[in-house]
Image (cartoon, grey):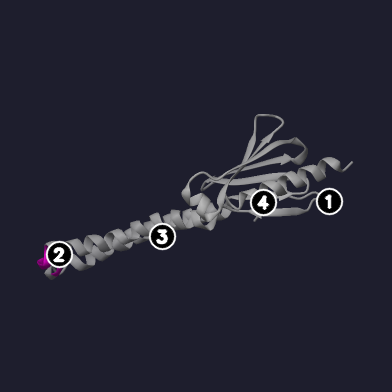
Amino acid sequence: MLSFTLSPNENVLAILRRHKFVLAVRLLKAVAVAIFPLLVLFILVLLSPAWTDEPAAGPVFWYFTSLFWLVAWCWGFLIWLDWYLDIWVLTNQRVISIEQRRLFDRQVLSCNLDKVQSVTTTAAGTLPTFFHYGNVEIKTADETSRLAFEQIPDPQPIQDKILQAHQEYIKKP
């Protein structure tokens, strides 16, 4: 599924995705949308119990509920697909960022380790601090591109791993 090729002496040091908590929070939105028709049914039964005696009411309600659930399921699948296809790869020679921006729009950025100038981590907020996820930002020598590993688990060890790989890459002839 990775859309790049490794050079003969290149080894993968880490493959990263967003934290699973971030996926769960985003999927909760789709679940909330899926629960909405059941709340409507509950309110309709409470406000108008005679509504259930109407012969066409049940099939029409369940038809639209099924459509609603189909949309919620598709939305949840797209959320999962975006999470699954966003990958950050660290090798012993470069850093690769693969981001699925929209359904048919993918951005692949690659940076050799000798171009890395600084690596910073941020974990701002209560949830990122509690669940140990955050961002790792890599600034490069060309100043036009920056690689950002967004909402990854344990950003501090990843920062150390990138800096260690950078030092080892520079030392090699």
> From the viewer's perspective, is the residue at label 4 or at label 1 nearer?
4
Of 24 and 2, nearer the camera is 24
Disc 2 residue type (three-letter): Leu
Disc 3 residue type (three-letter): Trp
Of 111 and 58, nearer the camera is 111
For mark 1, does the 10 Å Cα neighbourhood hold few (<14), some (14 to 19), or many (20 or more) residues?
few
Is the Cβ of the residue at disc 4 closer than 8 Å to that at disc 3?
no
For mark 3, does the 10 Å Cα neighbourhood hold few (<14), some (14 to 19), or many (20 or more) residues?
some
Q: Viewed as shown, does residue 41 lie left or right of 119?
A: left
Residue on which disc 3 sits: 73
Q: Residue furthest right?
A: 173
Disc 1 residue type (three-letter): Asn
Which residue does the image show at 65% across and 33% down from the upper left?
145
Disc 4 residue type (three-letter): Pro
Q: Earlier in the sequence, mark 3 or mark 2?
A: 2
What is the magenta range?
Answer: 48-52
> From the viewer's perspective, is the residue at label 1 or at label 3 nearer?
1
Q: Which mark is residue 157?
A: 4
Q: Which mark is residue 52?
A: none
Of 161 and 140, nearer the camera is 161
Q: Earlier in the sequence, mark 2 or mark 4?
A: 2
Task: Tell me which secondary structure the magenta stretch mostly adopts.
Answer: helix
Q: Position of residue 139 (x, y in %)?
A: 66, 35
Q: Position of residue 154 (x, y in %)?
A: 61, 53
Residue on which disc 1 sits: 9
Q: Residue furthest left?
A: 50
Q: Of helix, strand and loop, which one carries label 2?
A: helix
